[in-house]
Image (tube, rainbow, N blue to C red):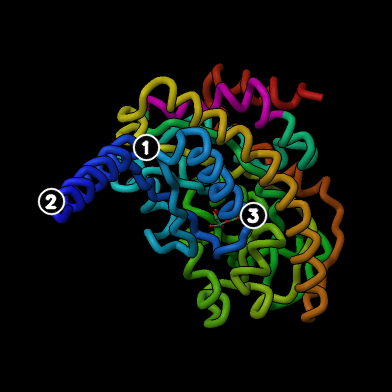
Amino acid sequence: MLHFKKLAGATLAVAALLVGTAHAQTVLRSSDTHPDGYPTVEAVKYFGDLVKERTNGRYEVEVYFGAQLGQEADTVEQVRAGVIDLNRTSLGPWNGLIPETKVPSLPYIFRSVDHARKVMNGPIGDEILAAFEPFGVVGLAFYDGGARSFYNSKKEINSKDDLSGMKFRVMQSDIFVDMVAALGASATPMPYGEVYSGIETGVIDGAENNFPSYDTAKHAEVAKNYVMDEHLIVPEVFVMSKVAWDKLTPEDQAIFRQAAKDSVAKQYELWDAKVQESRDKVVASGSKITEVDKQPFIDAMKPVYEKHVTDAKLQDLVKRIQETQ
Ligand code: GTR
């Protein structure tokens, strides 16, 4: 009897091991600079849920939010090297590497957030996602990053000329440096995580971002003047390291691609709610939001386009985006 029990126990243990092997689970690490609960973080978690469900638990995704794996510019290198498996960033940090990513990062390239969604979630977006592949990453999806506007700790901005001589933090991309210069101000590229103290200590007068970032990174505490010039609508991008991607079967690759596409609608829904929530929150805590005539801002961007839209391929991309209704 004792012998039988032992045998049964051993059989069970072996069976458990086999089941365990059949469901061998790979946990993929994904980076995000934003805190837990932010729409991009939640959209990637949702992607992870879909992947887990559709691969019967063989793959799981863990989101390292709040820049736990580093600032965006560093995580771009890490995902290319396969140190991290997945990454959600702005398109900005990719500009120096992948020419096609420069086009949706141009000031006033999109007429509205809806226009941006239409382009980035359609064939042009897919074309730009495909441009990542030669650089060691697979572009999976674009999320909405809303419109970015300037904010500062010094004064209310009522016209383009009010920006003259002021110092603003930008993301690490030449386009944004040139954009700020074209407006008569000066740009300091620096990591997102340093912006709060940069404003607080007066190293910079302000920065530029959408309402959810202005709110959750607490920039609204130190820079109360927000002007609705909406100079950029830079998409967010979700990518996978080619190192991790190449380990997937073609069937699993299809599951990952589809799950990423399926997470887009979720992100849009969360994003819209967050923009409203953050805007209400910053107003309640004393931020002053001013409207401004955007035309002088738009007119000032000609030299930025001339400098960065240099070859026929990028010119054609600009044209097709502008023509998208
Ligand atoms: C946010 C974006 C982040 C990061 C940040 C920044 O809007 O979601 O990924 O790029 O801006 O300004 O660095």
Callout 2 amino acid = His
Which element type, helix, strand or loop, lies under badge 3? helix
First in sequence, mark 3 or 2: give its number: 2
Q: Which residue is disc 2 drawn over? A: 3
Are dots 3 and 2 in contact, CB under 8 Å? no
Q: Main secondary structure of the magenta part?
A: helix
Between discs 1 and 3, the one toward the N terminus: 3
Q: Nearer the viewer, mark 3 or mark 2?
A: 2
Q: Is residue 188 visible?
A: yes
Q: Nearer the viewer, residue 129 or 2?
A: 2
For the record, the magenta segment spans 119-134
Residue 257 percent location from the top left of the image: 52, 29
What separation in Å lies between label 1 and label 3 (alpha carbons)?
22 Å
Which residue is denoted by mark 1 in the rendering?
A: 241
In the rendered structure, the answer to whether residue 306 lies left or right of residue 73 reads right
Under tag 1, what secondary structure?
strand
Q: Amino acid at mark 1?
A: Ser
Toward the viewer: 20 or 48? 20
Q: Residue at x 36, y 23 (%)?
A: 249
Using the image as rendered, state which of residue 123 and residue 267 is in the foreground. 267
- The residue indicated by pointer 3 is 39
Q: Nearer the viewer, mark 2 or mark 1?
A: 2
